[in-house]
């Protein structure tokens, strides 16, 4: 699918991987709705790229419905949805203060997994009603998983479970929505220089980068955005979860 003049929604678009993706899609001519729970940051990114800012809590059904409607009002029904909204906590199942709070586990699952599905179900319902493009496509959905879905570390039970769910649902949904000409994909990024890791001391960043075979550095957000663009462009790519991790296979620790 060619991005020029196509409506796109990027969740978590106010920072990190989402912001880089929003910028990349806009650069390619897409009309981008920057959806984020942080409305001020969303407005800043949207103003920069000439897009629309939409406040959205992806884990809330009503908020997501309103966001999809607002994006459609601004640019028309979206043919592209990129799910980048997500949270992560480092929490042992049994810590010094006892068992992990069930509410903490629930929150990660709700935002990362249920939030991604929530936006997907709503956006693809609209996509399925659109006229197909010359390629036969009606739309593309790309969600953000993580290498933690495959190589989770101690303290990542909730995060790994949420991202593993994204991996697991990608293929069955792709198979289901193929009848509408809607492709469904996911990216499993490794260690990227996002605000989360960018706040660590340089020594800590260097230590993480040392575990990466080549190149010996953290990933750049624009490298994630570049893969998103390729997935949208390549009409023969469907149902896949692509690891973007510089061949990283972290040893348990």
Image (cartoon, rainbow, N blue to C red):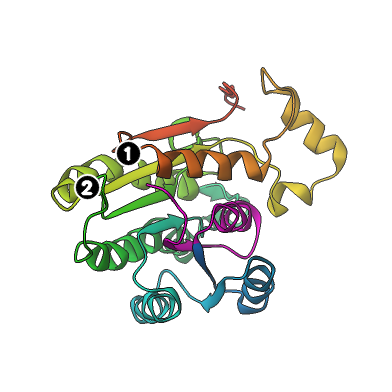
Residue bearing the label numbered 2: 136
Q: Residue at x 58, y 35 (%)?
A: 190
The span shown in magenta is 1-30
- The residue furthest front is 134
In the picture, the quarter occupied by the C terminus is top right
Mark 2 or mark 1, which has the lower sequence index?
2
Does 172 lie within the magenta span?
no
Q: Residue at x 59, y 49 (%)?
A: 95
Vertical order, 186 against 61 (above or below) = above
Vertical order, 43 against 197 (above or below) = below
Residue bearing the label numbered 1: 235
In front of the other: 250 or 47: 47
* Residue 155 visible in the picture: no
Q: Position of residue 135 (x, y in %)?
A: 26, 44
Q: CB atoms at circles 2 and 1 under 8 Å apart? A: yes
Vertical order, 206 against 178 (above or below) = above
In the image, 107: left or right of 1?
right
Which quadrant holds residue 37? bottom right
Vertical order, 227 against 86 (above or below) = above
Q: Position of residue 64 (x, y in %)?
A: 39, 75
């Amino acid at each position: 699918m060619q991005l020029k003049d196509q409506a796109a929604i990027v969740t978590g678009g106010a920072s990190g991987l989402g912001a880089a993706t929003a910028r990349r899609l806009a650069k390619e001519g897409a009309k981008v709705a920057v959806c984020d729970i942080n409305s001020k940051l969303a407005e800043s990114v949207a103003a920069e790229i000439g897009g629309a800012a939409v406040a959205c809590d992806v884990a809330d059904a009503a908020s997501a419905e309103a966001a999809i409607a607002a994006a459609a009002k601004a640019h028309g029904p979206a043919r592209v949805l990129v799910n980048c909204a997500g949270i992560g906590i480092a929490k042992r199942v049994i810590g010094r203060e006892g068992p992990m709070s069930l509410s903490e586990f629930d929150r990660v699952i709700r935002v990362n997994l249920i939030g991604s599905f929530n936006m997907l179900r709503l956006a693809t319902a609209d996509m399925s009603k659109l006229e197909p493009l010359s390629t036969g496509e009606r739309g593309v959905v790309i969600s953000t998983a993580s290498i933690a879905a495959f190589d989770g570390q101690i303290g990542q039970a909730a995060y790994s479970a949420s991202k593993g769910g994204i991996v697991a649902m990608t293929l069955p949904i792709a198979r289901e929505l193929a009848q509408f000409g809607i492709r469904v994909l996911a990216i499993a990024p490794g260690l990227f220089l996002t605000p989360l890791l960018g706040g660590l001391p340089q020594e800590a960043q260097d230590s993480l980068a040392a575990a990466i075979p080549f190149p010996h550095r953290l990933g750049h957000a624009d490298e994630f955005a570049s893969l998103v663009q390729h997935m949208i462009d390549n009409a023969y790519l469907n149902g896949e979860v692509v690891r973007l991790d510089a061949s990283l296979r972290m040893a348990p620790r």
